Image: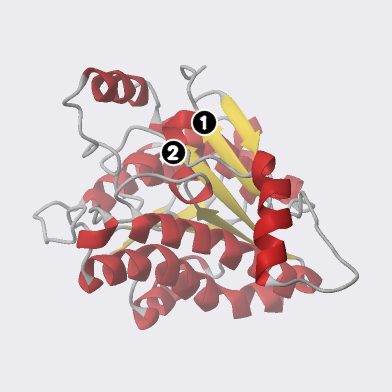
Amino acid sequence: MSTASNRLLQGKVALVTGAGRGIGRGIALELARAGARVVVNDIGVSLEGAATAESPGESVAREITALGGEAVVDTHSVADYAGAAAMVETARKAFGRIDVVVNNAGNLRDVIFHKMTEEEFDSVIAVHLKGSFNTSRAAAPYFKEQGSGAFIHMTSTSGLVGNFGQANYCAAKLGIVGLSKAISLDMQRFGVRSNAVAPFAWTRMVSSIPDETPEQKKRVEGLKKLIPEKIAPFVAALASDAAKHVSGQIFGVRNNEIYLFSQPRPIRTAHTAEGWTPEAIVERVFPQFQNDFYPLHRSGDVFTWDPV
């Protein structure tokens, strides 16, 4: 590991959830290269939550050790409140502190909305949104006590823009944006920051996208160019003390492109001194606002160019 890179996160301890594969693996390795000691959390299940014989977390921990870094493995589920607390305790027992939480663990239950079951909705909310709360809440008292800490939550353009067949995932990922902003506001006075990152990468999470039609095939070929490891340098920078002034923001990383996303603010207003009736709203307000209505775009309709 290079000396220059080591200094950025030297002395820091980071928890990375879902760190056994893909984006999480890349982040865990990059944080280690930057000098952080890492808790590699991975429950070792399929995207649908089924048990597997794999232990991807162990593999990543060995890679970190081979780099000259320090890592321990944790296999608790982020969806379990006590399990999330145990992850933070793993960090404190192994390394004496906790400085960075990267909420990356995820699952998918893609299905068109009118066919979605309660279990399919709840299971995705439990991992993405509730899981991000669980791990963040577990670390928060320690961040407050030490007067520092960085939360980095993975959102998605599925939530920020929209996508077919992902009502559960879209709701969870946009919910994470709200959670991140609330954390940044509540913990600002303690020197704690919180940001959301929308990663673009070809991983298990997107490899189930259908590629049957020519249009779908073209989209999938474009997605395959998105390298998971490209997300990691931005996360390492965001986790460092050099980003102490950055909080409450929404970013995106797409290969060599980095985005700052807008946040909802009023763009048009309508008022009347007499007060509104339903009929007046239909007659005046909807036509006035119509030119500024957002189209029913999907993520792919907005990000139409090849990755740089």
- Residue drawn where x is 36% and y is 51% of the image: 19
In the rendered image, the vertical position of residue 252 relative to residue 195, given as above or below? above
- Residues at circles 2 and 1 in contact by the CB criterion of under 8 Å: yes
Horizontal side, residue 255 vs residue 123: left or right: right
Element marked by disc 1: helix
Mark 2 burial class by Cα count in 10 Å: few <14, some 14-19, many 20+? some
The location of residue 31, given as percent across then percent down, is 52, 44
The location of residue 198, given as percent across then percent down, is 51, 44
Horizontal side, residue 132 vs residue 43: left or right: right
- Residue drawn where x is 61% and y is 31% of the image: 258
Which residue is more in the foreground, 252 or 187?
Answer: 252
Farthest left residue?
A: 53
Which residue is more in the foreground, 82 or 9?
Answer: 82
The location of residue 125, given as percent across then percent down, is 36, 67
In the rendered image, the vertical position of residue 105 relative to residue 97, given as above or below? above
- Residue drawn where x is 47% and y is 51% of the image: 159
In the rendered image, the vertical position of residue 244 relative to residue 220, given as above or below? below
Which residue is more in the foreground, 300 or 134?
Answer: 300
Please state which amino acid type lies under the numbered disc 1. Answer: Val
What residue is disc 1 on?
302
Mark 1 burial class by Cα count in 10 Å: few <14, some 14-19, many 20+? few
